[in-house]
């Protein structure tokens, strides 16, 4: 698997770690300007550790859905181009603003990923990638609603949370149902469970139909 340009494996704190160049955000160890990317705190980091071909590349324009306090999106903004970070909850959004203060390619948006019409006037179209990590029921619908921002050859890279869809159902059944809905608008290219980094999560890479 080829890592995106700007993401490397570096020797940090005695271990070979995924890393990006940038200001530290969450207490992660650093070395020579590189900051370790902790896969146990990042679904995208886990997908890279699981050697999924995300299709992400250095300089990509990215829409990030579910940015929370900025742990993962800070790494994305280190290697990507313009990165639009959507977060619904005000408290983590305040942390996200602080993360963006020294990242001029990161644009925080206090919006709901389920209603993309509220930020369509801000986010450019024909983006290279959407990364989605939202803790809500209807994760496939969120991806379908935001498909409008992707270029024809863009990628959806999503972390599907089984417990956010249904806390009582078997995760495998939840994933099957989410993928079936997702396939109404996307071609699924690959999937991978994210254990041992994240329980009951499925990494998905897809492209718009």
Image (cartoon, rainbow, N blue to C red):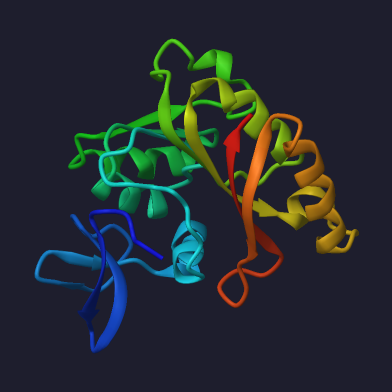
Q: Position of residue 140 (x, y in %)?
A: 71, 38
**Direction left: furthest residue:** 32
Q: Considering depth in this image, is 80 or 108 the residue closer to the camera?
A: 80
Q: Considering depth in this image, is 125 or 152 the residue closer to the camera?
A: 152
Is 64 on the left or on the right of 36, as rendered?
Answer: right
Question: Which quadrant, please, contains the N terminus?
Answer: bottom left
Q: Position of residue 50 (x, y in %)?
A: 51, 70
Q: Quadrant of residue 101?
A: top left
Is 148 on the left or on the right of 26, as rendered?
Answer: right
Q: Position of residue 128 (x, y in %)?
A: 40, 33
* Numbered disc total: 0
Is 78 on the left or on the right of 54, as rendered?
Answer: left
**Direction bottom: furthest residue:** 14
Q: Quadrant of residue 48?
A: bottom left
Residue visible at 66% across and 45% down in the picture:
188
Q: Position of residue 71 (x, y in %)?
A: 39, 54
Residue visible at 21% across and 41% down in the picture:
103
Question: Which quadrant, please, contains the C terminus?
Answer: top right
Residue visible at 29% across and 42% down in the picture:
80
């Amino acid at each position: 698997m080829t890592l995106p340009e700007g993401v490397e494996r570096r020797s940090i704190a005695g271990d070979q770690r995924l890393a990006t160049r940038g200001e530290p955000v969450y207490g992660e160890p650093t070395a020579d300007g590189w900051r370790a990317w902790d896969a146990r705190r990042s679904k995208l980091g886990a997908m890279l550790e699981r050697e999924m071909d995300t299709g992400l590349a250095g300089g990509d324009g990215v829409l990030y859905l579910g940015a929370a306090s900025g742990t993962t999106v800070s790494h994305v903004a280190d290697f990507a181009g313009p990165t639009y970070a959507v977060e619904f909850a005000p408290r983590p959004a305040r942390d996200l603003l602080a993360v963006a203060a020294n990242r001029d390619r990161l644009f925080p948006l206090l919006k709901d990923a389920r209603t993309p019409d509220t930020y369509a006037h801000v986010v450019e179209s024909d983006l290279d990638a959407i990364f989605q990590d939202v803790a809500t029921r209807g994760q496939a619908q969120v991806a379908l609603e935001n498909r409008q921002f992707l270029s024809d050859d863009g990628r959806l890279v999503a972390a599907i949370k089984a417990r956010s869809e249904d806390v009582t159902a078997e995760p495998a059944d939840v994933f099957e149902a989410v993928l079936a809905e997702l396939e109404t608008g996307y071609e699924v290219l690959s999937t991978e469970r994210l254990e041992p980094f994240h329980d009951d999560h499925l990494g998905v890479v897809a492209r718009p139909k």
